[in-house]
Image (spheres, rainbow, N blue to C red):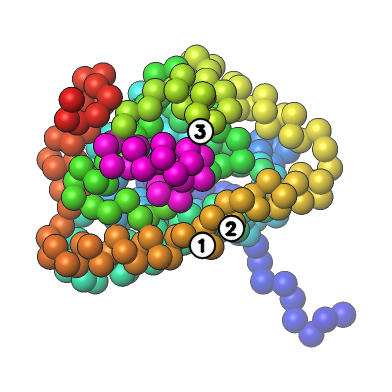
Amino acid sequence: MSLTSFVPTPKFEEYRERFKEHYKLERRADGVILVRAHTKGGPIQLSVENHRSVGQLFKTLGADPENEIMIFAGTGEDFMMDADPEGFRLEKEDLAYWAYEYAYKDGRINVSSLINDLEIPTIGVLNGPGFHTEICLMCDLTICSEDAILFDLHYDIGSVPGDGIHSCFQELLGVKRAAYALLTGQAIDAKTALEYGMVNEVVPTGKLLERAWQLADHIMTQPRTTRRLTTQIVRRPWRQRISNDLDGGFGIQMFAHLAKKEPAHGRDHIRSKVAYVRKGRKNNFD
């Protein structure tokens, strides 16, 4: 008998409670776990706090051997179209500290945790329009609603798009399409996202989660080891892209913030820059 015991693994009931402010967690008996990101029960409002929670969640889910597939979705009519009113107060108070502690460090962990810490198949569900959709787009499979719109707002708010969205768009769209999307804030509708290969299926909004469970049911037909090792194959392009691009892109983005000496994530500022999407326009200048 060993002199020491295993360190206890996370328990679902405990971390479901711990993460409830940011995620509603539901797990079936077979280990398929549904994660619905939210702010106060509605669509995600970007903040320093929920930004940090992403990597914390993925590391926790990955450390629980009872999880077998993750479905990751938003809540409500939007995925993410707003910022928390006080969500970037820490950026305003101490830009230099925020740039490393809450942006560079947390952001790199968020993306790398999805790719490296979750050794289970993942299904992203885009329930509506939103920015920072890379977490859903970088899941092994991604489905979206008919009214989903994908876009990046970094350039329009005066920020360099280097925090993972650039890696995601360049991998999925290719060099020219990604450059256009990142520089113009192109609003990519669901049909175009499917044509571009950003998502696997476009599904009626009311049937999104039903379809996600169906996909999970199919994946669960094969043994545990087969499922988990298949993820190692399908994620190789993402691992290579993240290894090559993420740290450098984040470093450039944070240098730009510090060089400007001013925050970029105020709620009013973000709202004004995403209004064109709600108006059905392709970008912010035509």
Question: Circle 2 is placed at which residue position?
Answer: 240
For label 1, the residue is 244
Mark 2: few, some, or many residues within 10 Å (few <14, many ≥20)? few
Q: Is residue 259 left or right of residue 251?
A: left
What is the span of residues highlighted in magenta in the rendered image? 165-185
N-terminal of the pair, mark 3 or mark 2, is 3
Indicate the quadrant where residue 5 lies.
bottom right
Question: Where on the picture, by quarter, is residue 141?
Answer: top right
Q: Residue at x 45, y 60 (%)?
A: 246
Looking at the image, the residue that sits furthest to the front is 176
Please indicate whether residue 146 sits to the left or right of residue 30 in the image: left
Residue depicted at x 50% and y 14%: 204
Task: State the CA–CA distance, disc 2 to disc 1.
Answer: 6 Å
Is residue 40 at all visible to an observer of this figure? no
Which element carries disc 3, helix, strand or loop?
loop
- Where's residue 65, x and y in %? 70, 54
**Label 2 close to label 1 by CB (< 8 Å):** yes
What residue type is disc 3 on?
Met
